[in-house]
Amino acid sequence: EAGVTQSPTHLIKTRGQQATLRCSPISGHTSVYWYQQALGLGLQFLLWYDEGEERNRGNFPPRFSGRQFPNYSSELNVNALELEDSALYLCASSWGRNTEAFFGQGTRLTVV
Amino acid sequence: AQRVTQPEKLLSVFKGAPVELKCNYSYSGSPELFWYVQYSRQRLQLLLRHISRESIKGFTADLNKGETSFHLKKPFAQEEDSAMYYCALRNRDDKIIFGKGTRLHILP
């Protein structure tokens, strides 16, 4: 069974541009979580989608947004990129509440 | 505030010695607590959860509500235990809050 897949694995953007990161959950999983792993800051919760709806959001500015598609895959969009947005962005999926979350390998975003 | 604190960024332990990775949490209610591990060049994966009360790869963790702690322990460290370890809490809104992680380095 395929795990959580994220694309691209690496992304380089310049300041002010927009980045789109993609996540395909494990088949049958309806919940998708996005985390930012910046150097020295650990894993910071970004967004949680379940059944196509945004259920929860972390303390990030509105230029971080996303959506979940009918097939439960998800996109994370970061607008007006800043240098501090450089980080590893991890996606995780689960069956839903109170179930184990499985992580993807991440997308490393570098803003120059 | 809901918070997970891992006080040690790096922990170096000799092979065969006991390991204890500290985790303290702040949460008003009954939390669900986890330990995740990330080995070199691998994805983050669940190591154990407190409700299972199981031992995985020789690791155990006991929830101490009085001390609001969920320390991860192993009696005898092995070289393959070298990894990044994250303590995490799932709140009633199903959000998983992670600590900043502790890098465990097993010395030969």
Image: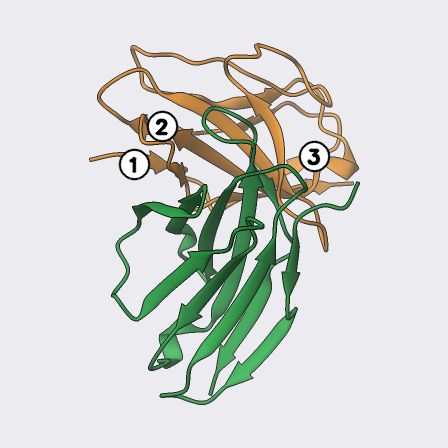
Chain colours: A green, B orange
Q: Quadrant of the N terminus of chain B?
A: top left
| Residue A103 in view (yes/no) | yes
> Label 2: chain?
B
Q: Which dot, 3 or 2, sits closer to the camera?
A: 2
- Residue A4 image position (x, y, % from top left): 66, 49
Residue at 51%, 39% in the rendered image: B86
Q: Which residue is mark 3?
A: B14
Would residue A9 be found to the left or right of residue A70 on screen? right
Q: Tag 1, which secondary structure?
A: strand
> Label 1: chain?
B
Q: How many angstroms separate mark 1 from mark 3 (CA)?
A: 30 Å
- Amino acid residing under circle 3: Phe
Q: Tag 3, which secondary structure?
A: strand
- Residue A104 image position (x, y, % from top left): 63, 51
Residue at 40%, 46% in the rendered image: A48
- Amino acid residing under circle 1: Arg
Q: Quadrant of the C terminus of chain B?
A: top right
Q: Tag 2, which secondary structure?
A: strand
Q: Earlier in the sequence, mark 3 or mark 2?
A: 3
Which mark is drawn over residue B3?
A: 1
Q: Which dot, 1 or 3, sits closer to the camera?
A: 1
Q: Which residue is mark 2?
A: B24
| Residue B11 in view (yes/no) | no
